[in-house]
Amino acid sequence: MARQDYGNDLTTPVQQPGGKLSNDGYGLLTATVVWKANTNNDLSVGNRGSTCPLNAQLAAHKFSVTYDNLGMAVITVDYIGIDLDTNEGVYTNPEVSASNGLTSENITTNPNFFTTGGDGYVGLIAGPQGSFTQSPLGPLVEIKSPVDYVTQVIAAQTLIIAKKQSYIGQHGACFESSNGGRFIGFVDPSHRHFYGKTNYLAPQSSFSGHFYTSEAIEVQNILSYLGTTSYDNDWAGVLPMIVPTYAGTSWHASAENGGYDQLLLSQVNVQDYGLLYKVNYEVRYNVQGWPDSVYRKSSIM
């Protein structure tokens, strides 16, 4: 028996009841709307960028089609957009997670190696520079300048010695010179907690997050600040607040450590999401700060 058509001929898709609109709490709006049409319809209702009938701020992101019997097509369209009450619809509030732990670092980078590292430390690791003394505990090291070569006369023969005894500081820390120079290692076995050690566990924190934006300029901004440091969580007001305020409000290292900015934008990834851009990023925190002779300061860009 042939199909008998009655009522709406469905030459254009017809919206079905039961549409769903959601807000993720950060300003991202998503919606799902079901449409029905004849199988010979062009399915344009699901085209990327099509306006959502539930909220004009949303645009189609993707769709799927189920072909029912009797020549019917069920079109399920997913929409995405930004709530106008969130940053005027330009970007969502960043959704952030923090990672804190310990990572292996060279012992010479410890802030308490040569000078006092701050509260909580007891004594220096190697001692102050200039206080090291020569000791047979350490190996002989090469003399850098020929003018410092030692000349000895043994059995009427001249012997030029191009090496000298290395220097020892606290806990058996061994160096090329009394001021430090190359660190050779901990060579005194009586200091068993230091002997043979080259690394220590240093605290490391990072913030990973993402936000959505409708503006390409916001993407270009954060990409241009990749690899730069900051003393605040929005890079002097240029970027969204990509580090939450509960983590702190000022990220300057102490004056004794150079006053360097402690936040570094270390990673940025971008992908299209409907008519929006999804920006994933990572910010690294360094308690000692990031030296501005190595890393660009965002505040002077």
Image (tube, grey):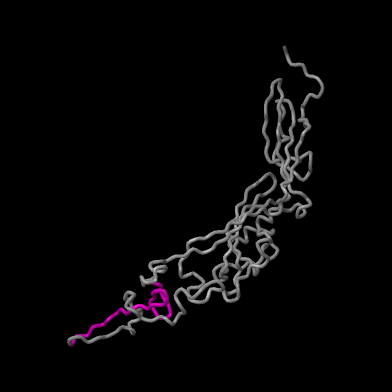
In the image, taking residue 170 as reference, residue 68 lies left or right, namely right
Percent x, y for residue 31? 73, 40
Where the C terminus falls, by quadrant? bottom right
**Foreground residue among 37 and 131:** 131
User: Considering only vertical position in the picture, is 43 above or below 229?
Assistant: above
User: Considering only vertical position in the picture, is 289 above or below 2?
Assistant: below
Where the N terminus falls, by quadrant? top right
Q: Residue furthest left?
A: 155
**Foreground residue among 101 and 263:** 101
Residue 221 visible, this angle:
no
Q: Residue furthest right?
A: 7
In the image, taking residue 242 as reference, residue 121 lies left or right, namely left
User: Considering only vertical position in the picture, is 119 above or below 159?
Assistant: above
> What range is drawn magenta here?
156-184
Percent x, y for residue 251? 63, 67
Q: Residue at x 60, y 61 (%)?
A: 265
User: Considering only vertical position in the picture, is 127 above or below 279?
Assistant: below
Percent x, y for residue 75? 71, 31
Q: Residue furthest top?
A: 1
**Residue 224 lies in magenta, yes or no?**
no
Percent x, y for residue 101? 54, 59
